[in-house]
């Protein structure tokens, strides 16, 4: 009887979990296969500024992390999936906000990573469109691989760059405290 009950509970739980979560009208699958791994959605949220929804973003990892700091500093495969949901985002605004995000993430260490940051920003040259998908995939072997519109745009090596990039959303001075909590899955 206990086995039957445990089986029924297990089946109920697996069917009651949604296959995806919608955030800002954007579906985020619970699981994503990439880079030879199956990643789990850790959390997702919308970045807004002045009451305007700019983009939806989700964090994917191989395991659940207990804190933003642990996730940011982990030298393990993980993904950020970002979907533009505002037509107000332009290349220039993206460039400016990305530099500002790195400055807040790195503080006084910003100049040490400036070359990598500008290489990263240059990968986003060109028009940005509502609905555009950006994947930032980190593996210890490859570094941070940037995909835009389904195409590989480039790679930035090193754990330090990954920490700085993820620090934009998960660091001590994030783009948004509420978004940080959502990305950790709280």
Image (spheres, rainbow, N blue to C red):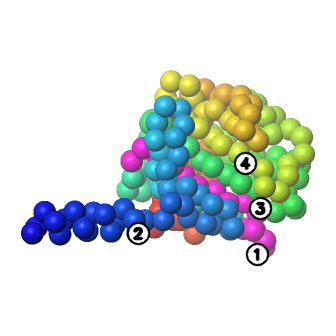
Q: Main secondary structure of the magenta part?
A: strand
* Label 2: how many Cα within 10 Å (few below 14, some 14–19, many 20+): few
Q: How many angstroms separate mark 3 from mark 1 (CA)?
A: 13 Å
Query: Is label 3 or label 2 in front?
Result: 2
Q: Is residue 152 left or right of residue 16?
A: right
- Pointers 3 and 2 in contact (CB under 8 A)? no
The residue where tag 4 is placed is 133
Is label 3 in a helix, a strand or a loop? loop
Residue 153 appearing in the image: yes
Image location of residue 15, percent across then percent down:
40, 65
Viewer-nearest residue: 182 or 15: 15
Say whether residue 56 is magenta: yes
Give the quadrant of residue 29.
bottom right
What's the magenta region?
48-63
- Pointers 2 and 4 in contact (CB under 8 A)? no
Q: Is residue 142 above or below residue 123?
A: above
Q: Is residue 168 left or right of residue 148?
A: left
Image location of residue 141, percent across then percent down:
50, 24
Q: How many angstroms separate mark 1 from mark 4 (CA)?
A: 22 Å
Viewer-nearest residue: 33 or 160: 33
Say whether residue 156 is magenta: no
Q: Residue at x 50, y 56 (%)?
A: 30
Q: Residue at x 39, y 47 (%)?
A: 63
Sequence-wise first label, 4 or 3? 3
Q: How many angstroms separate mark 4 from mark 3 (CA)?
A: 10 Å
Q: Residue at x 76, y 46 (%)?
A: 99
The residue where tag 3 is placed is 85
Task: Kindly identify which numbered label has been placed on residue 16.
Answer: 2
The residue where tag 1 is placed is 51
Sequence-wise first label, 3 or 1? 1
Q: How many angstroms separate mark 2 from mark 1 (CA)?
A: 33 Å
């Amino acid at each position: 009887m206990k086995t039957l009950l445990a089986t029924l509970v297990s089946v109920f739980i697996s069917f009651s979990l949604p296959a995806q979560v919608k955030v800002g009208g954007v579906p985020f699958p619970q699981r994503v296969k990439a880079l030879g791994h199956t990643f789990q959605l850790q959390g997702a949220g919308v970045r807004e500024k002045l009451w305007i929804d700019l983009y939806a973003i989700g964090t994917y990892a191989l395991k659940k992390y207990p804190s933003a700091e642990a996730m940011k500093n982990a030298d393990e495969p993980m993904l950020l999936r970002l979907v533009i949901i505002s037509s107000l985002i332009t290349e220039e605004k993206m460039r400016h906000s990305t530099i500002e995000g790195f400055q807040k993430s790195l503080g006084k260490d910003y100049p040490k990573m400036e070359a990598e940051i500008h290489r990263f920003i240059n990968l986003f040259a060109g028009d940005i469109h509502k609905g555009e998908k950006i994947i930032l995939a980190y593996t210890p072997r490859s570094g941070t691989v940037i995909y835009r519109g389904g195409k590989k745009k480039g790679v930035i090596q090193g754990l330090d760059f990954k920490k700085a990039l993820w620090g934009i959303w998960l660091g001590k001075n994030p783009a948004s405290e509420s978004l940080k909590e959502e990305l950790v899955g709280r």
